[in-house]
Amino acid sequence: MLKIGLIGKPNAGKSTVYSALTSNTVDIANYPFTTVKANLGIALIPTPCPEKIIGKKCKPREGTCINGTRYVPIEIIDVPGLIEGASEGKGMGNEFLDNIRDADALIHIFDLSDFPISNGGTSPGYDEFLGIEMEMVKWLSSKISRDWERFAKKADSSDERIERSLLKKIGSMGINEKQIAVILGRSAYPSKLTLWSQDDFVQLSRDILFVSKSLIPLGNKADLIDEKTAYRIRSIVNNCTMVSGDYELAMQKAFSHSMISSLESNFEISGNVPEKIKMALEKIRSFFSEKWVSRINEFLASVVTDRLKYIVVFPVYDESQWTDKAGNILPDAFLVPEGTTALELAFRIHTDIGNGFIRAIDAKTRRVVGKDHVLSDGDIIRIVAKAS
């Protein structure tokens, strides 16, 4: 399953954002290391469900479907706070960094209210923001450079492509050969591994984080700043999305008690809500109408579809009824990278199905396609395979 890691310094509100995304309850408090070990939960990514096309109600095996919108699960991991020196083993650094090793993307959560103080000036919060990223770069760099000389000599003496050699060194960091090739094409690395220097290790670490791991900034506690401050922060933190974990949780709680009509930003307030609570909910509704503010789930969906470039496909057993063997309609929805082929989907379903692949059928068009057929978002696919 796709996994997104939440990182950030203590007190940044990671646990609040995690709870808003997963609707799970974790310890939330304004002091360091409230999260003493990783929390792993499930968030849901919305996508149009083909049930509207076939005119029959789907039956999801995982996630859910509401009014024609399918909600596909992904994993969210909230890991312990990172402090300066974590790359040297201080605090909970090693545990923190090991927990994000297999994340497909990393969301760097920071406290918006602890950031710039004036035009052209910054606060310690900005230095801490940069420090988190530097700690991760330093940690990756130390992992890469360990026993490098012996590794490089052996690799250079072989006939392997450089990306294949590097895979043996950094594959455990959750990176594949294709991603390594992309990284090597972005920066001017020496052609011989024995010529690499500390600067190359640092650059490779940055490329892993910002290219392969898609390190993405997310400003939390937007309810504590104004629009002018928001634009000032965006001028120094590129592609920064701004949210309020506290307001998201407040909305979820109000909805669970039937105080508001929905979790949409333009929700209606129930007529029997006490005046004090009504005023608070009106403030939240007004806040989420601001153009510089984002909803957390919309942000997460954009990370998956726009940043990571994932699509949703629906594998079925019966291409005419869009069901599995038991007759369940559209039971599965898989998030897969753009460019995924029919054969790759077959292996995703089961190794035996991939090994026995004969052909695939596009259930919408009833067209037979081959193993190299590239899937599109929303495709409904039947895989025909030899019985093992």
Image (tube, grey):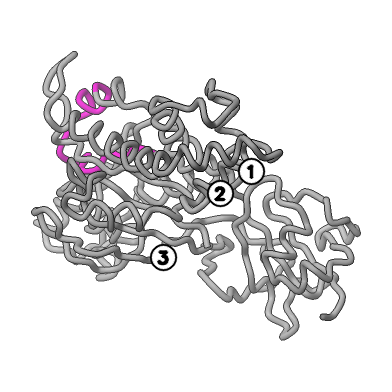
Which amino acid, by three-letter code, is at mark 1?
A: Arg
- Which residue bears the numbered disc 1? 164
Dot 2: element: helix
Residue positioned 57% across, 55% down in the render: 47
Query: Alpha carbon of mark 1 to alpha carbon of mark 3: how far?
Result: 33 Å
Residue positioned 83% across, 51% down in the render: 372
Dot 3: element: strand
Examine the image and state in which quarter residue 136 appears: top left
Position of residue 108 in the picture relative to residue 33 (left or right): right
For label 3, count other residues whose C-alpha is less than 10 Å away and answer few (under 14), some (14-19) or many (20+): many
Residue positioned 68% across, 80% down in the render: 328
- Which residue bears the numbered disc 2? 168
Q: Which residues are magenta?
A: 216-232
Picture disc at residue 42: 3
| Residue 113 percent across, percent down from the top left | 15, 36
Position of residue 6 in the picture relative to residue 36 (left or right): right
Which amino acid, by three-letter code, is at mark 2?
A: Lys
For label 2, count other residues whose C-alpha is less than 10 Å away and answer few (under 14), some (14-19) or many (20+): few
